[in-house]
Each structure stands twice: as structure tokens, then as C-alpha cells.
Image (cartoon, rainbow, N blue to C red):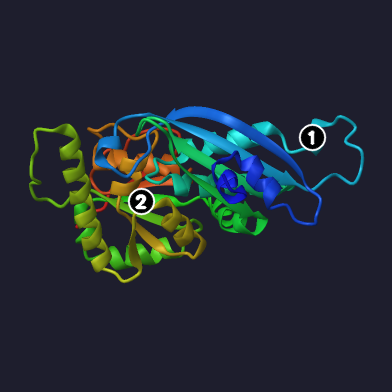
Amino acid sequence: MSDRISQAFGHPLERAEALAGAELRDRISLRDYITEVEIGAFQQERGHRQRLRFNVVVEVVPHDAPLADDVDRILSYDRVTEAIEAELDSERLNLLETLADRVAARVLMEPQAERIFVRIEKLDRVAGALGVEIMRSRSDAQPLAEEVAAHGVTPRVIFLGNPVIHGTDLGSLLDEVAGGDHPAILCCGPADVAAPQSQAALAQRRIDLLAIEQNAWVLAGRDARCVVVNTRTELDWAMKHDQISVWAPSKMVLDAVHAPAVTASALDLAYWLAEEMSAAEFLVMGDVTPPMGAVPVRRVGVGA
């Protein structure tokens, strides 16, 4: 077997050694870390957990002074496992490639880390193992660093009843929203028409989510300042750029690791989003009773 093939099928540590440059670097490694998670792009992979195996090598710049046996001066192995678990817990993903990228970027945010090799394998799809392996350097961590910084922004999540969406005061309401201290995320329920019905609960959930999204587009069509968004990344970007977002819930709800109940109402979904975004406030505009939880709630009765 040639050196290149050996490196391709060997442990990431072998790849790191083969690609070592002139600059001296130390390495820490995590071998055969196995956990279970729901992941996959195929419909048959939804609702089922499968085993993933992680092998990770992190290159760090050697210290220019004695460590003095001080754990705070090194990159702890726990930071690697915590990065894995944090990404697994943040969102249901379709691709191993996406997971590997995010784990790598999170580890590379540590000040000691310079380069990382990540291999992730699915152990339950075939008789062997299916996987990906990536190499990333410190500069690749910048996009995630910006995303994490955006997570510190606290939005105001606003649920609009249908009379508000179709009312004559929508423009002035949005004027007030645009001038607020917190970026706004608008949520709505379905239109006041009957949605198709399915006997399968999960199928009905998708139908109900699509009905909400149809109404979100109706809301966005009433004012050019409103932009429909459906991912956490889009929401983070919109908050940083003072954009008024209208939430399309399907992707975030269906991909959530800790998803709301299948029977959750549109109002419950909006409040779930407020908790996920650590919102400063959940504001309900319309004749509906808001849920209660960790995010402060304010109700404003607004008619047509």
C-alpha cells in the first residue's frame, strides 16, 4: 500500500504527521469517540439515532515557557469532546461534512489550536463505516466566531395575529419595530382558511408548518422591510444588520434536537423560537393568550 493510500485510511494523526511543516507543533488527539445522534439527509434516517465515531487531532503551538503542570495553560481534551457535543446538541444536521466543519471551527476558536483534522464515521448505515475527513486551519474558524458573536444579540420576537397582518396599522407598527432597541423577528400563524388534514401526525405537522410559512410570505409581501428567513444562520445575520425577519419555521423545527411537541400551536412555536434565541421579550399582538416561560411576555391587544 502506498504512503498516500496508507495516510488516507490511517488515523488522522498519520495525516497530521505527513503534512507537518517546518514549524514545530504539538498534537493532542481524541480516538474512537462514539456517540449516538439523529443525523442524515434521507427520510428513513429521521426519527432514528445512529452511532457516530469521531477521531480528532489538534495541532497546537508549543509553549514558550514551562507549563508548571497548569491545566489552564493547555488545550484540554474536554474542549474537543465539548465541541462535538455542543454541535450535536445545537441542531439536527443532514451531512457529516457540515458537522465536521462546525466541530473543527469550534475547536479552532481555542487560542492554542492552530490546525485540526476531523474524521467522522457512521457505523450503522452499512456493514462497514461511512465517513468524511477534513483538515482546517485557524483562519477557517472566523465564520463561526462571527456566528457565536451574533448569538449574543437579544432579539424581540413578535407574534402577529391575522387581524394585525391585514390591518391598516401594519406600516406604523413596523416603523416602531424598526426603531426599537432589539432586532425584531416577526412570527405568525396560518391564514384563516382550513388546511388539509392527514391521519399521520408527522405529516400533519409538515402541513401545518407549511401553512404558517405561506402566511409568513403574505406578511412579507405587505411591507418590503420584512424578509422571510428559515435558518438560525439567516436570523443571526439579519439581527446583526438590523433586518426585520419573518420566521418560516419548518427547517428549524424539523431540525431541532430539542423540538417542540408535534401538536404545538403556531403561538407555541413562536415562543419556542423566543426561548431558542434567548429573546429579550416575547410580544403578542392580537387577541390571543400567550404562553408563559423563561422569556418575558407582553400582550398588546390590536384589532384590524
What residue is pinned by disc 2? 158
Give the residue at x 25% y 57%. Answer: 216
Give the residue at x 40% y 61%. Answer: 177
Dot 1: element: helix
Task: Identify whether 134 is placed above or below 92.
Answer: below
Q: Position of residue 32 (x, y in %)?
A: 56, 29
| Residue found at the very far bottom of the displayed protein | 224
Residue 81 visible within the image: yes
Q: Position of residue 208 (x, y in %)?
A: 18, 44
Disc 2: CA contacts within 10 A as few (<14), some (14-19) or many (>=20): many
Task: Identify whether 173 is placed above or below 195.
Answer: below
Q: Position of residue 88 (x, y in %)?
A: 47, 37
Q: Is residue 71 left or right of residue 144?
A: right
Q: Could you tell me how far apart the alpha carbons at marks 1 and 2 are, in whole angstroms? A: 43 Å
What residue is pinned by disc 1? 72
Task: Identify whether 255 is placed above or below 224.
Answer: above
Q: Nearer the viewer, residue 137 or 149?
A: 137
Q: Nearer the viewer, residue 258 or 173?
A: 258
* Quarter occupied by the C terminus: bottom left
Mark 2 is on which residue type?
Ile
Which quadrant would residue 275 be assigned to in this image?
A: top left
* Quarter occupied by the N terminus: top right
Disc 1: CA contacts within 10 A as few (<14), some (14-19) or many (>=20): few
Q: Is residue 117 left or right of residue 168?
A: right
**Mark 1 in CB contact with mark 2 (< 8 angstroms):** no
Q: Nearer the viewer, residue 153 or 84?
A: 84
Give the residue at x 19% y 56%. Answer: 214
Camera-side mark, 1 or 2: 1
Mark 1 is on which residue type?
Asp
